[in-house]
Amino acid sequence: MQEIPRANIFGYEGKFPGHVCGDAVDLIRGRPTGAVRISFGYMSQRKDVETIVKILKENFIENSPPNDLHVISNGLKENRAPTSSIWLSGLSLYPIKSCAAQSIEGSWPLDDKGLQFDRHWLITTGSGVAVTQKRLPQLAVVHPNVQLSKHRLQLNATATEVLDPITIPLDHDAGELSSASLCSVRVCGDRVPANVLDDVEVSDWLRDVTGTEGLRLTEQTEVIRKCRLKNVAGENSTPISFANESQFVLVSLVSIRQLKDWMKARNPSATLDQEAEHLVSRFRPNIVIDGDIDAFEEDNWKTLQIGNQVFESLGPCNRCQMVCIDQKTGEKSKEPLTTLSTFRGPRIPFGIHLRMINQGTHAGETPRLTIGDEVTITERQVNATNGLQ
């Protein structure tokens, strides 16, 4: 409750008379003059009261973490050895930014920006404005597939069975892309050059799938875009593609299962598909891990090794309404963002950003990640509140 000195109260009465219930005079000299009041009348129903109580519980009452979360300050279970088994259980790239994921069955090569061809393309309007699922959720049904052996990108659409797939070569001759094909696009505040694929067939295909005219496919140039997230040395020189912030996003299936339990507890009758695999797709990660770890233990990791590759954590991936878009249909809902904000705080962190700091391969070999690779946590963050690691 806001405490106002008695002298101030009398001062307000003398200089600011006429304050009545329902007016807009809630601040005087920058100080709040009262509390929020909830009024009920003869038409109010029990469900109105229950709704208010629910809002208060979810947004204003602080509770200790649920017992089933098992959070321990140093990120380790007390009865588990530090060498417990963790493995790479899922690998996805997103050839076209904000379109569907391409799930990797075996292994995939890496380059200096992350997974090869991850967020290598971008859909823009005729004026060069980048289009994402926030603006056009139907992009979720556009399924790009990079076929390395055939040197091509194939586009499929799950929304219709009428449209045939369309293919685009991965390699371009020097004469194919002229200066007239260059444009400038804005990605997360960065203005970067891109090559416009002036292909009427591709634009028509995108129109038929999304119902939007004038869409164009643009490709990243050789100009290097830098990661905005700083590493432990305070540097932000890591090269990235059209990705929002980092080379990789990692999520844990253990954390996904915890989120699933929270959602079921909050709304047992919810129609949202709460299966772990479907929930994972909403977070659009590159790397999915599983194993003998705690939920959200990944928040405390500083460096880790996956297979032969060493990665550094650049901090949590804070979520927005993108996670509310069903990646199968493009339909929007309130979950899982509502549940996450309740249990994870206002920044809504879920998963972590990674950058590759060492390619553990022999000279001349292309570094790769492979499903089933062992994950080793090599260093943990120092807890800022209790000093534990």
Image (cartoon, rainbow, N blue to C red):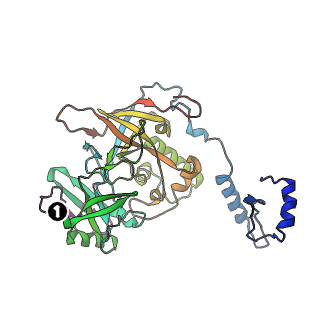
Which region of the structure is painted magenta? 155-174
Quadrant of the rendered image containing residue 291: top left
Looking at the picture, tell me which residue is in the foreground, 321 or 40: 321
Residue 198, compared with residue 264, is above or below; it is below
Report x, y in % for residue 286. Answer: 35, 47
Name the foreground residue: 75 vs 6.
6
Q: Judge from the rendering whether residue 252 lies leftward or rightward of residue 34; answer left or right.
A: left
Q: Residue at x 44, y 48 (%)?
A: 276
Q: Can residue 256 be seen in the rendering of this structure? A: no
SS of the residue at dot 1?
A: loop
Give the residue drawn at x 18%, y 36%: 365
Within the magenta stretch, is there residue 165? yes
According to the image, label 1 marks what residue?
Answer: 177
181 or 212, which is in the foreground? 181
Question: Magenta: predominant secondary structure element?
Answer: loop
| Residue type of the residue flagged with mark 1 | Leu
